Image: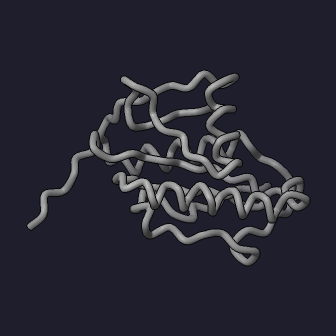
Amino acid sequence: MPKLPNIDQRTLVTFLLDETGSMESIKDDTIGGFNSYLSALKGSGELIDFTLIKFDSRRIEKVCVAIPVSDVAELDTKSYQPGASTPLIDAAYKTIKAVEKSLNGKSPKVTRLHPNRRARECLHRAQLGGTERPHEGEKRCWVAV
C-alpha cells in the first residue's frame, strides 16, 4: 500500500471566483485565465488539493473542496455564467469555512501575503496564466485577503 502524504507535503489552493454580472464583459478572459492557471497547477508535479468556490448574489457554490487538482474540471461557458450582483464578504466567509472544514482539524503552516502587494501579484500572475510558487522559506498554504 502506497504511503499517503501528510498535510505538510501537500499544497492547498483555494480559488474564490466572482461569477457576478460585472464579469460578463471579461467572461472569456476569465475562463481562459482560470484554465491556464489550472493547467499549470496540474503540470507542476506537486501534490495539490484544489478548492473552487463561485459566487454571486443568488448563491455561493462549492464546485469542489480540497480535491486533487488532477480531478478538477476546466471552466467553459456552461460552467461559468456571470449574473446577479456581488456579495463578496459572504463568499469570502464561506470560502474560509470550507477550507477550514477540508483540513479536518489539522493546522497547516500558513504563509501570509501582504494584501496590497503580494496578493495582487499572485492574482496578476494567475490572470497571465502563470503560477505563484512559494518563495524560499515560505510554507505551502497561501492566504490572500
Q: How many marks?
A: 0
Does residue 125 lie above or below 24 as drawn? above
- Rendered residue at 22%/51% (across/down): 5
Q: Quadrant of the N terminus?
A: bottom left
Side of 98 relative to 83 (left or right)? left
Q: Position of residue 123 (x, y in %)?
A: 67, 40
User: Seen from this angle, which residue lies furthest bottom?
Assistant: 78
Quarter holding residue 33: bottom right
Question: What residue is drawn where x is 64% and y is 52%?
Answer: 129
- Left or right: where 105 falls relative to 66: left
Q: Quadrant of residue 44?
A: bottom left
In the rendered image, residue 130, in percent from the top left (x then y), is placed at 60, 47
Q: Residue drawn 40% across and 51% down?
A: 102
In this rendered view, identify the residue nearer to me: 128 or 69.
128
Q: Which residue sits at x=50%, y=45%?
A: 97
In percent of width and height, residue 60 lies at 67, 57
Q: Quadrant of residue 11?
A: top left
Quadrant, the C terminus: top right
Q: Quick check: 43 left or right of 37?
A: left
**For this rendering, which residue is in front, 82 or 122?**
122
Left or right position of 45 against 18 = left
Q: Residue furthest left?
A: 1
Scheme by which the image is coloured? one colour
Q: Is residue 46 above or below residue 118?
A: below
- Residue 70 spot, x, y in % from top left: 43, 66
